[in-house]
Amino acid sequence: MYDNIPPHAGDFAGILKHSFEETRAELVRSLDSHAKLVEYATRAGHRTRPIGCLLATAAVGGSWSTALDAAVAVELIHKSSVIRDDIVDGDAIRSGQPALHVAFDVARAISTSDLLWTLALRRLALYPHGLQACAVEALHEMAAGQIEDVAPSPGRGSVVQRRLVEERKTGALSDLACRLGALIGGGSPSQVEALSRYGRNLGTAFQILNDVRNLRGEESERRCASDLRNRRDTILSAYAREVADARGRARLDAFVAGSGDLPEEQIEVLRETILATGAAEFGERTAAELMGGARRQLEVLGESTATEIFESLTRDALLSYAF
């Protein structure tokens, strides 16, 4: 499931994943309608967020099995969001198969997305910890980040502001996963907050590395420079704008301010302009700093297999797997 995890810890992660998949399958079987759509939408993925939820429960000394319903809820929220992302971004492939809106249609995809996040909230209502309110806050933060991504507010194109967008879009859900697990496991306030920050840092780091891979053309499921094709600003283009020479800055400002499709040759010029500023390397440094910050959060936890896996995810594994 993950790279560079010691064998005994990898076995534990495998047990968590197996139990998660059984619980997810039980949910699908329990549906009285549209189980086929829910199955297709949730059938695959890295599962790092729900496994992170289970690991957080174990890391604070709780029984990970008590968090299985919450782990499923986290994955339902994630899949709900990626259905919409694929539509908005024009992506046709998800987890190696046609995206839901391609396999079925846009109307059914949006309706399935709505169903998934409401199923998630109902599942979290089974817990007595106020977990549902945590999920509502995370959903709001994700939506706020997404709308700022596709319809940015005027004057909010700095590196700092773009990093906040990345944090809200992606970091908030990883934060939620770890927070829920720690609360269910009975973690102390300091442990809950530390694991929440751990998740937020890793989720944000992944989003930035995802932007780097896409800019370099290293992703298999999205076209190279898809953000540029959609006239979407990222932390990388924001950095490039801040450090580019006058000519490069004017080119990037025109890209952000413009509308309509860009010719292929213009996309390539913009991509080369951003790469020439060292933006990809800046993204990697920023992600490494976030991962280092995540590792430091683990200091409040005792030694355990769960903590060992969390630590391993802050290293090379993050380069290959989403969190």
Image (cartoon, rainbow, N blue to C red):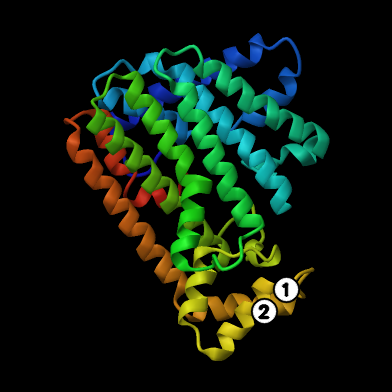
Whether residue 105 appears in this view of the structure is no
Q: Quadrant of residue 8?
A: top left
Residues under labels 1 and 2: Cα distance?
6 Å
Q: Quadrant of residue 224?
A: bottom right
Whether residue 301 appears in this view of the structure is yes
Using the image, tell me which numbered label, if any, was put on residue 258: 1
Q: Quadrant of residue 191?
A: top left
Query: How many tags in the picture?
Result: 2
Q: Residue at x 72, y 29 (%)?
A: 112
Using the image, tell me which numbered label, if any, was put on residue 254: 2
Q: Residue at x 28, y 51 (%)?
A: 293
Instruction: Give residue 321's position: percent from left, percent from top.
Output: 46, 45
How many other residues sit within 10 Å of disc 2, few (<14), some (14-19) or many (≥20)? few
Look at the picture and state if 38 lies above or below 165. above
Three-letter residue code for mark 2: Ala
Q: Horizontal placement of 296 versus 174: left or right?
A: left
- Check the picture and name the quadrant holding the C terminus: top left
Q: Horizontal placement of 57 versus 91: left or right?
A: left
Cβ–Cβ under 8 Å for marks 1 and 2: yes
How many other residues sit within 10 Å of disc 1, few (<14), some (14-19) or many (≥20)? few
User: Tag 2's secondary structure?
Assistant: helix
Three-letter residue code for mark 1: Gly
